[in-house]
Amino acid sequence: MSVPRQCLRELGMIGAGVMALVAAFALNMAHGEARIGVGDIIRSFAYNDDLLRDVVSGFRLPRATIGVLAGSGFAVSGALMQSILRNPMVSPGILGISAGSFFFIALATIFAPALIVFMPIAVAVCGGLVAVLMVYLLAGGFRATPLRILLAGLIVAMTISSITGALLLLYESEARFLITWSAGSLRQNGWSNVQLVWPWIVLCLIAAFTLSRAYDIARLGEDTARSLGQKHALLVTATLIVVLVLTGASVAATGPIGFVGLVAPHLVKLAGVRRHAALIPAAALWGSSLLLAADSITYMLGSLTSAPPVGAITAALGAPWLLWLVLRRSRGGQMNAASSLDFGRAGHVSPTILLLALLLLIGLTLLAGLMFVGGLPLSGMQVMQALSGKAAPLMQKIVWDMRGPRILAACLAGAGFALAGALFQAALRNPLADSSIVGVNGGATAGILLMVALFPAASATGIGMAALAGGMLAAATVYILAWRTRLTPTFLILIGISVSALCGAFVQILVMQTRFTDNPMVWLIGGLYGANWSTVQILFPTLLAGFICAMLVATKLELLSLGDITARSLGAAIAPVRLAAGATGVTVAAICVSQTGPVGYVGLLAPHLARFLCGHSLRAVLPVSVLVGALLLGLADIAARLVIAPGELPAGSVIALIGAPYLIYLIRRSMRT
């Protein structure tokens, strides 16, 4: 392409971005609790309409201005990260920087409010830096490949978000405004936020534009850039500082809004813009336009108190974009994705001894749940008397009606998630698969909330069917799309996370649009708050039927680990076996989600621990996984109720605190094998 033609294309994209921004700015100014025409806004200043002018200058103009600043900050951060990492699928949200910034803001808001008053941007930047360091260490440091960086970022973002959700729930009074803001919001009361962040964002945008020539050279490759005299390490450091400040300032003003930094740079690149001198301003213009348009959509969907968060709208738009990118890159073979991930050798403890030991540990866990959890500690003798019906009525009520069903439900749900994870990992030949990764948890959650929103008096059966339908739909979508990538583990994970993000956006919209009788945040993090004997009656037959089905297909399912061609030559009907295993896993996981909320990591941890203990035979891994999962969630629920007694943590957050380090260990170990 000739230079003049390239320049015309760049100028055209920048000009189109200016027009899009003007239109989005005017649209955003017009929308709010009441619709105001652009002409009325202009006349309010000309004819001294004090009330209308106060609304415009005090609320809508600051809101639109912060949208421009934050949108450009997120978009340019994404463009710089994609360039310096040479990875088209990264952004501040996907790599966990936004989640880290918001986590530190939440920590400071709760425990050190003075820091938020005097240095909010510094707090946000520190949080983003911690997230970057976690991603760097998890991905393997200087040896990190683009795909490992991406996977590490997704894991860090999911883990930090889970912990942040638990923190906001525990300290609801101290951080009540953060709960809504955690999904992103442009609403402003005055110009204080604009005055706080605009110098930082503008200076960083200028710095990024100044380095545009260096980014063009870096795109040629690290070795070539060095041969041309570029100090690559210095450029990476400068870029990291710019990205952290841009993202931290944007998150401090609007909350962690995702996908703007992914979509906006790609829109510009699809138009043929390659030089960073044009890419950076064009990305800033289109990022601002996207964020303002998304915010305007929120007001079209609800009033001031029920409008969905802008982060849900950007996720609903951005998740399909990420999905398209994954499929496009998989077809082009442009990312080195291993067909499998090796997590080292397994152990070989005797299955009989192992099962007996696990059963004993589960029995002790049940006893601990009956004795120590609650305001009234009981002795072992008192528990036994209550179980046999010889204790006082109060003791029997505590053991039978309060503590007993909850600890049983925790163990049964943990066993169910573990069984589903073992089936998914075997059927998909993916050691990182579980119900949350392949979209089942997100789909089931969306199905349940939709059922409750439409039919508030829905029965437990109806809720279970809604969870099953949502989980099946999400899993089928992931499987069909991943089949085009030959079920490559890394691409399957990315597709699953894209579908989960889409489901999460739908859930956020439902939460804001519907007045639920209870706080849905409690359930969305995952926990056993409302467990009773009806919960046990639903979970036990589901687990029993799922385990029987899993054992029936275990022998043929083991053959899939040899590869489809070998398995077919040995007489395995690959499609029916994979379908049966997947359907069983989805059913069990969806029913568990309907009773406990979307508890993650159990289905990932338990099968790995089982293989570590007993080897790779699926007929041994399945029962051991079930018992390990029961033990994990049972202990997590006990810890959740004891750590901050008389308060209570969500069990899902406790599992995340355990699961994230173990997952980091698994991936780090796989890099050494």
Image (spheres, rainbow, N blue to C red):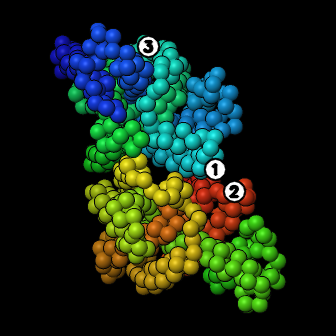
Name the residue rendered at 35%, 65% in the picture. 455
Mark 3 and mark 2 lie on one chain; the one further toward the N terminus is 3
State if disc 1 and disc 3 touch (CB < 8 Å). Answer: no
Nearer the observer: mark 3 or 2; the answer is: 2
- Write down the quadrant of residue 42 in the picture: top left
Q: Which mark is residue 82?
A: none
Q: Secondary structure at mark 3?
A: helix
Q: Identify the amino acid type marked 3.
A: Ile
Q: Which residue is mark 3?
A: 206
Q: Nearer the viewer, residue 29 or 364?
A: 29
Position of 375 relative to 319 (above/below): below
Residue 151 lies, in percent from the top left, at 47, 47
Position of 494 relative to 235 (above/below): below
Q: What is the distance, in whole Å, between disc 3 and disc 1 at their CAs?
A: 41 Å
| Crowd band around label 3 with a 10 angstrom C-alpha radius: few (<14), some (14–19), many (20+) | some
Name the residue rendered at 45%, 15% in the picture. 202
Q: Which mark is residue 170?
A: 1
Position of 136 relative to 465 (above/below): above
Q: What is the distance, in whole Å, between disc 3 and disc 2 at their CAs?
A: 48 Å
Residue 622 lies, in percent from the top left, at 52, 77
Mark 3 and mark 1 lie on one chain; the one further toward the N terminus is 1
Mark 1 and mark 2 lie on one chain; the one further toward the N terminus is 1
Q: Identify the amino acid type marked 1.
A: Leu
State if disc 2 and disc 3 touch (CB < 8 Å). Answer: no
Q: Which residue is mark 2?
A: 647
Name the residue rendered at 37%, 20% in the picture. 51
Q: Quadrant of the C terminus?
A: bottom right
Q: Identify the amino acid type marked 2.
A: Gly
Q: What is the distance, in whole Å, between disc 1 and disc 2 at their CAs?
A: 8 Å
Residue 55 lies, in percent from the top left, at 38, 22
